Image: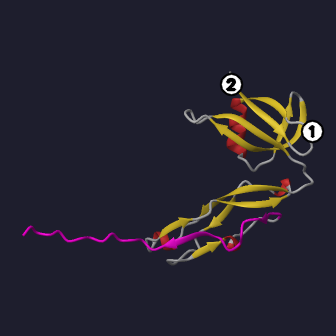
Amino acid sequence: DGLLPAVLYGPELKNSQMLVISQQVFDKVFRAAGANTLIDLVIGDQPSGKVLIHDVQYDPVRHVVVHADLYKVDMTKKINATVPLVFVGDSPAVHQLGGVLVKNVNELEVRCLPTDLVKEIPVDISILKNFHDTLNVGNLSIPAGLEVMTALDINVVLIAEPRAEEVIAPTTPA
């Protein structure tokens, strides 16, 4: 019927609350907001505070959302979240030298106040100029207010040399 079952929970709520949301409205908001943007929840005509889309479940065949978890945040307490990395720029090592960009990490675990949460963290790969150049978590430009929980020495991205396949000369029958 175009409706999506959802559950609302959080530290301020004594019990979780079952909701039914318009599938069309949810899909539009989820595409725009993702999992790391605060959303103003309105139940009926009553504002119900800020929520994060905490988890979604998909139909394995149709690839549509069939259930959503909404987490009502306490705006005064820090939360843990996973923020995706977005790789921006062009690496000279890739475009000029034919290197291979190897992405080892696609997201970071962070801790912050809900108002400091960002949708994504950009990673500028234009500084990767030679083979074997790397960027670690500690090299990233992290927005103010975010405390990175991922180890700073973890390699996020590197440039690998292209591998050539060994060509075996054809043999002639004896």
Indicate left or right for 121 with 116 as reference: left
Q: Position of residue 113 (x, y in %)?
A: 86, 57
Is residue 24 left or right of 44 when viewed as pictured?
left
Q: Position of residue 94 (x, y in %)?
A: 48, 70
Choose between 4 and 116: the one closer to the eye. 4
Q: Which mark is residue 14?
A: 1
List x then y, in percent, for residue 114. 84, 53
Q: Residue furthest top?
A: 1
Name the residue: 73% across, 45% down: 33
Q: Residues in magenta?
A: 145-174
- Judge the density around disc 1: few (<14), some (14-19), many (≥20) Cα neighbours within 10 Å: few
Inspect the image, locate mark 1, and give the three-letter code of the amino acid beneath it: Lys
Label 2 sits on a secondary structure element that is loop
Residue 102 lies, with reference to residue 77, above or below; the image says below
In the displayed structure image, the side of residue 97 where residue 173 appears, left or right: left
Residue at the extreme front of the image, as rendered = 174
Circle 2 residue: 2
Residue at 72% across / 39% down in the picture?
29
Write the residue at 52% across / 72% down: 159
> What's the amino acid at mark 2?
Gly
Q: Earlier in the sequence, mark 2 or mark 1?
A: 2
Question: What main secondary structure does the magenta stretch of the protein show?
Answer: loop
Q: Is residue 29 above or below residue 86?
A: above
User: The N terminus appears in which quarter of the rendering?
Assistant: top right
Between label 2 and label 1, give the one nearer the viewer.
1
**Which of the 4 quarters of the picture holds residue 163?**
bottom left
